[in-house]
Image (spheres, grey):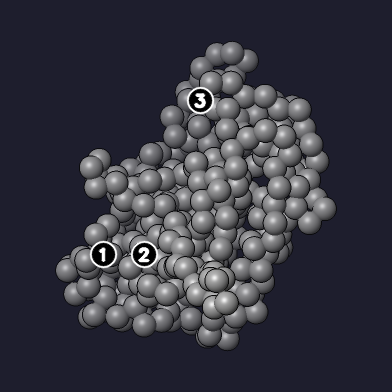
Amino acid sequence: MSINSQTETLMIVGVDDGHDTIKSCWGWDKETGSFKYGYHKARAVEGLQQVMSVGSHSSTGGAYETEGQRFTVAGSQNLLRTLDTRIDGYPISDLNRTLVCHSLAACGLGDTPVLLITGLPVDQYYKNGAPNHALIGKKIESLAKPVTRIGKGPGLARILKQSVISEAIAAFYDVLIRPDGTFDADIESLISRRPVGVVDLGGKTLDIVVVAENVSSVYNDRSGTSNIGVLHLLDKVADRIKSEYDLNSNPPLPFVEQACRTKKYELFGEIVDVSHIIEEACKDYLTLVKNYFVTKAGDGSDLGAVLFVGGGTALILSALGADAFASIYKGKRIIVSEPEYANARGMWKYGTFVLNASERTMSTPVKAA
C-alpha cells in the first residue's frame, strides 16, 4: 500500500476582526466589478438567549459553544446589553473566535475549506521592531480551536490554514494591488520614493503607521496605537444626546452610529435633528486624531501621502466629508472607496497574490492500495 497526497483548494478569506465590526472579503466578482463582502457587528452576550429574526435577517444571530463557553450573537437585537470587546486579549479570546466563526457562516461559507487571513494592530503585531511571533502564534492557535453551533443555522467554515499580518500593511496592499493582482503604477512609484502613512480609525483603536519604502517594513518609532477608536467617538455622541435631551441613560450605540450617518435620531418615536451634536463631536474627535498623528509622524512633510482607512474613516466621511481629513494631514491624502473594508480587502489580496501556491492550498495524505 502506498500513500499519496491530494491537494485541496482553499477559499481565501480576509477577516478584519475588529472590536466594533467583523469585516470579511473573500473574492472579486469580475462580472459585477465588485468585491464579495461580509459585515457583521461584533455584538454578543454570554450564555444562551432567546432570539428570533425574520426575513432576510434570519442568519444574523446564532448561539455557539467553544472551550466550554457559550455565546449568543446579538444579530439585529440592538437593545441587548452585549459584551464589551474592548478587553485585553480580545484577539485570542473565546468571544473573538465565536464572532469570527459566526461571520464566516453568515457570509455563506459554511463547510467551506478556508485559508483565513487576519491581522493585528501595529502595537500588537510588532514587538521590539520585529513581528511578535508569540502573539501571532497564539492568535492562530485560538482561531483553530473548535466552535460548534447550538441549534439550527448555517454550517461553519473549516479553517484549515491561517496567516496573520499587520493591519497597516494589509491596508497598504489594498491600495497597491488591483483586484487582478497587478500593481497600481502610481502607488508603486510613490512607495518606491517615499514612506506612506496609514491612519486606521478602528473600533477600539487608532493606528498610526508609517510604511517604509518598497513596503519593506514599518518605521516603528513613528508608528503606534492609541485607544481612541470610533467607539470612543460614539460614546461621546451618546453622552451629548443624553445630556441635551435629559435622558436617564445613554442611547444604545447601534442607534447612535446610525445617527452619526444620518444626523437624525428617533427619540420617543419622533425624528429629531442632531446634526449639531454629530458635527461638533466629530470635529473634537479629529482633534484627538491629529494630536496623536503629530506625536508619531510629526507634520508628515517627509511622507509621500497618508492613507485613511477603517470604519471611523467611513463614518467621518458620511458626517463631515472628505475635506475634514485635511485637519489631520494637509498633504496628499488617499481615501479609498469603502474604507471600512480596506484591511479585509488587503488581507484577501495578500493571501491571493502574495502568498505562494503551497501556502494557498492544503495537501492531505491519501492511502492507495
Residue that label 3 marks: 56
The C terminus is located in which quarter? Answer: bottom right
Disc number at residue 163?
none
| Residue 15 to residue 321: above or below | below
Q: Position of residue 108 (x, y in %)?
A: 49, 41
| Residue 182 to residue 344: above or below | below
- Position of residue 236 in the picture relative to residue 44 (left or right): left
Q: Amino acid at mark 2?
A: Thr
Q: Position of residue 67 (x, y in %)?
A: 78, 56
- Position of residue 285 in the picture relative to residue 127 (left or right): left
Q: Amino acid at mark 3?
A: Ser
Is there CB contact under 8 Å for labels 2 and 1? yes
Residue that label 1 marks: 181
Is there CB contact under 8 Å for labels 2 and 3? no
Q: Earlier in the sequence, mark 2 or mark 3?
A: 3
What residue appears at the point 31 percent right and 54 percent down from the top-left corner?
335
Q: Position of residue 83 (x, y in %)?
A: 73, 45
Q: Residue furthest left?
A: 185
| Residue 92 to residue 83: above or below | below
Q: Amino acid at mark 1?
A: Gly
Residue 327 at least partly seen? no
Mark 2–mark 1 Cα distance, whole angstroms, equals 8 Å
Mark 1–mark 3 Cα distance, whole angstroms, equals 34 Å
Q: Earlier in the sequence, mark 1 or mark 3?
A: 3
The N terminus is located in which quarter? Answer: bottom right
Label 3 CA crowd tier, 10 Å (few <14, some 14–19, many 20+): few
Residue that label 2 marks: 352
Q: Position of residue 188 (x, y in %)?
A: 22, 73
Q: Residue furthest top?
A: 269
What residue appears at the point 63 percent right and 35 percent down from the top-left corner?
153
Q: Earlier in the sequence, mark 2 or mark 1?
A: 1
